[in-house]
Image: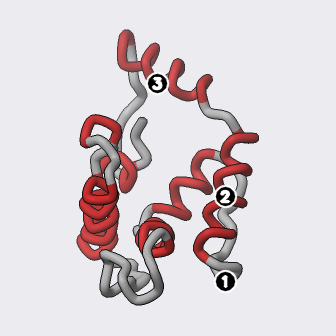
């Protein structure tokens, strides 16, 4: 995550509003659905916003999720590999986002790779 100092003024107000909108119950619903959709061998995240972000950060869960929406062997992400290297993680997130757009998600509803990777928004 980027080293950012404390936020002030409007930036702080916006971040506080985002933090207030986070719904831990919805997080649990999403986790159950995603694990069920991907298969039971997907580990569950630590509870809370940071745990959820860390769970998705390397892109493997997201790529498995988008592939699960297609018939077996026809998923749009051919190679899914866990990696600790930032550029590989961001590449997998980007592959998920491209596949999600091809699946029919509107470009205006898609987040930016760096926002997930850095835990922003």
Q: CA distance from mark 3 to mark 2?
A: 23 Å
> Are there few (<14), some (14-19), or many (20+) residues within 10 Å of tag 1?
few
Q: Residue at x 59, y 25 (%)?
A: 21
Q: Nearer the viewer, mark 3 or mark 2?
A: 2
Q: Position of residue 75 (x, y in %)?
A: 37, 78
Callout 2 touching callout 1 (CB < 8 Å): no
> Are there few (<14), some (14-19), or many (20+) residues within 10 Å of tag 2?
some
Along the polypeptide, which appears first: circle 3 or circle 1?
Answer: 3
Indicate left or right for 48 with 61 as reference: right
Indicate left or right for 38 with 114 as reference: right
Give the residue at mark 3.
Answer: 15
**Residue 41 badge:** 1
Q: Residue at x 67, y 58 (%)?
A: 31
Please identify the quadrant where the C terminus is shown: top left
State the count of labels: 3
**Extreme top residue here?**
9
Give the residue at mark 2.
Answer: 31
Helix, strand or loop for disc 2: helix
Q: CA distance from mark 3 to mark 1?
A: 34 Å
Q: Residue at x 39, y 51 (%)?
A: 116
- Which image quarter: residue 74? bottom left
């Amino acid at each position: 995550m980027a080293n950012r100092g404390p936020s002030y003024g409007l930036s702080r107000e916006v971040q506080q509003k985002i933090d207030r909108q986070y719904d831990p119950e919805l997080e649990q619903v999403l986790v159950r659905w995603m694990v069920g959709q991907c298969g039971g061998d997907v580990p569950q995240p630590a509870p809370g916003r940071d745990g959820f972000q860390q769970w998705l950060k390397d892109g493997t869960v997201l790529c498995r999720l988008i592939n699960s929406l297609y018939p077996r062997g026809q998923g749009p992400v051919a190679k899914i590999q866990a990696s600790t290297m930032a550029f590989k993680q961001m590449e997998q997130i980007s592959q998920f986002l491209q596949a999600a757009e091809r699946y029919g998600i509107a470009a205006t509803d898609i987040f930016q790779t760096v926002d997930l990777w850095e835990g922003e928004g």
